[in-house]
Image (spheres, coloured by chain):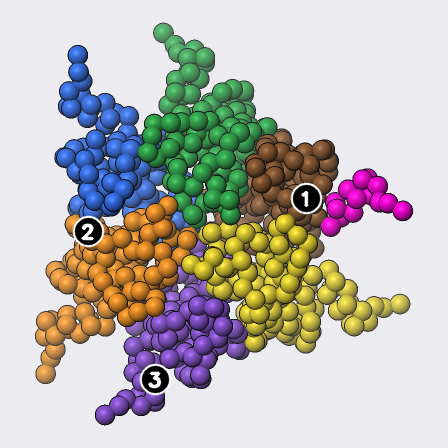
Chain colours: A brown, B green, C yellow, D blue, E purple, F orange
């Protein structure tokens, strides 16, 4: 019996979930000793790209970053745990939600700090958009 | 005769306009030899922060990044010219539009590549939101 | 009924498992277009530190890096998926095994590229070694 | 009526003026919490290269950096505003003056911190010096 | 009279000794204000690669890093002086010992901080192991 | 018998000679695949600072960089060997000559690529210039 497209999508979503954790050391902070927003966006884009590529196994490019909320500053000396998951799948595009959690070093406390959604398209070898699956 | 708030705002908008230009060298590119999106976002956030701080001369933090469009890839070996301008001023928050233009090295050709809008708030010394002017 | 030390250790090992994935872009490669070994070691040390800190929730420092094997070069344009897991727990020290897997972008192929084991000790506020749990 | 060489030069000088502003965050400072001199020189060279390239729209290389004065340390938590302008034009070479201004974040105060002059030549496709215009 | 292989090796060992000194500035430290271990390993690998390449003048790759000891933390605001020397020469492989010394800025005091040994092989143009001399 | 100031200076010059070698990998190059001039200046400033500090063991700051000549481009895939030596000693200032040599990886060939001279002063704890010895 054939796997439906929906089952295929669900399976790919699971397999493409991506985690990247980083130490918030001085080379990533601003003069308030919190993570510089630009560094946060840089890491989020890397995670979005990996999540989308793992889903499609095709060349993926970002077309837009939807509203991104910076809810809490991420203090120096904590961990930034970045998660990416595919949340919507179209024919030639998909959406990846990326969240950054603050994880304290010396307690189990975790809080959501930043979240945003990236829209990405798949390109074929001619650079034309193509199906994501 | 007193300067109106509107005049004050227009004057500050002009004074706070910000430009940062960068060479797209290999330390900023992905494996397609175009500017890595995360690097682009990193530069945009730095320009947004500077533009907002110049406008307010207060401690500014990013609360959100509205829809950001990646219209064209920025090739290695070109310049990325990043411009920031305050486009909207509220009581305790303002919006900064940031655009990246591709400028070719060996011709005058320029094109818009990325644009986004950052919402930022002013904080006082107690970390509470305060008026941006 | 009390949880035994062994159960506590098993639970902490699971909770402290750590993943960090990175794109192998030009800013991380040598002139053979493979990941520079020093960058690999840098990422492994970051993952070891996070894994150990998550296990202990105390100040952890690396005392040694046991034999590390570089089994395969990691090509530019692939992902480096770095995993850390606590493999041995003593009174005041623990061992974290860190592995880097090459994950291809455009296929599901994965291979072990580098593995090493870090020995870490817990320090108290006076800078003396202390129990890891 | 033809534009004279002198008019052409004046026009190009205006069009090639270049600005790059940077935040002085911990990843750019030394252990005195002032901008590391090497980072300052790095930014100045980037601005000199862009200014010269914009003037000529040819391949430009630095042949020398004339006397550079470090007049004031640039404190962490300020902006470094770097300006480049072509100040002298020969047949096959030109000079670019680059200045760094300290701009405080929470006042309009600006001061000159560093200035230097770069001599650059234009190269043709064979790598020989060629006219800058 | 011909130079023996042993003499050749001794001469090459002397010529390949390598030194790299670095300032421990904030872009290299962790949140304890000591050199991040990953940065230390990164520098050691660079020195090992240069030492081995200078010895062989062939393409060298690291196959393993033997036990590395972190004996002392390297404080921010000191120098890290990294030395590499070939300590063992086989047919197709060699060993490079790399040590990092803490050198204080404002006294002559020096101490060994980290030491490790890298095993490296020479590769020919087909990517096969070849003699190191 | 007392050591003369001249002997003291000669001894300090020898002890303060400084070497830093770097691989020219893609994270240091421009789009011509040669070492970016700004990176070269950055390394030279670091070596000048270390050489001067080793000579004086006091807080040293750069006051100027005299004429710096870029004689040859440094190709990607080579080593950049940077040497610093004190060449002139005044009461409160000294000069450090810094040279970068290109060292090829697969031959013993070495050539001078860049040279410059840094003028540095010693500061006491009040930030006033003080004797360098």
Segment tinted magenta in the rendering: A1-15
Q: What is the secondary structure assignment of the residue under circle 1?
A: helix
Query: Which chain letter goes with mark 2?
Result: F
Q: What residue is at 29 percent from the left and 33 percent from the top?
A: D57
User: Circle 1 is placed at which residue position?
Assistant: A56
Could you tell me which residue is drawn at 66 percent across and 70 percent down?
C132
Give how far apart the Cα atoms at labels 2 and 1 are: 51 Å
Within-10-Å neighbours for mark 3: few <14, some 14–19, many 20+: some
x, y (%) of residue C32? 45, 60
Q: Nearer the viewer, residue E58 or D115?
A: E58
Q: Could you tell me which chain the residue with mark 1 belongs to? A: A
Rendered image: mark on residue F68: 2
Residue D59 falls in which quadrant of the image?
top left
Based on the displayed image, in which of its 4 quarters is residue B64 positioned?
top right
- Find disc 3 in the rendering and name its residue: E9
Q: Which residue, as the protein is rendered here, is positioned at the far bottom?
A: E1
Is residue B116 in view from this perspective? Answer: yes
Of all chains, the one bearing label 3 is E
Q: Is residue F45 left or right of residue B48?
A: left
- Distance from disc 3 to disc 1, alpha carbons, whole Å, reads 53 Å
Q: Closer to the camera: disc 2 or disc 3?
A: 3
Confirm or deny contact between disc 2 and disc 3 (CB under 8 A).
Answer: no
Q: What is the number of the mark on residue D132?
A: none
Quarter of the image for the N terminus of chain B: give it.
top left
Residue A6 percent across, percent down from the top left: 82, 39
Helix, strand, or loop for circle 2?
strand
| Disc 2 to disc 3, C-alpha distance | 38 Å
Does B24 sit above or below residue C23?
Answer: above
Between D97 and A37, which is closer to the camera in this rendering?
A: D97
Q: Position of residue A103 (x, y in %)?
A: 65, 51
Task: Mark 2 vs mark 3: tell me if same chain.
Answer: no
């Amino acid at each position: 019996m054939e796997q439906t497209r929906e089952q295929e999508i669900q399976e790919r979503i699971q397999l493409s979930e991506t985690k990247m954790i980083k130490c918030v050391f001085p080379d990533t902070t601003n003069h308030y000793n919190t993570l510089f927003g630009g560094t946060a966006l840089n890491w989020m884009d890397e995670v979005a790209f990996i999540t989308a590529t793992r889903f499609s196994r095709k060349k993926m490019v970002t077309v837009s970053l939807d509203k991104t909320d910076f809810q809490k500053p991420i203090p120096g000396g904590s961990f930034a745990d970045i998660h990416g998951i595919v949340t919507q799948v179209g024919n030639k595009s998909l959406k990846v939600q990326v969240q950054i959690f603050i994880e304290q070093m010396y307690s189990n406390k975790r809080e959501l700090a930043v979240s945003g959604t990236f829209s990405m398209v798949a390109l074929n070898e001619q650079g034309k958009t193509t199906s994501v699956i």
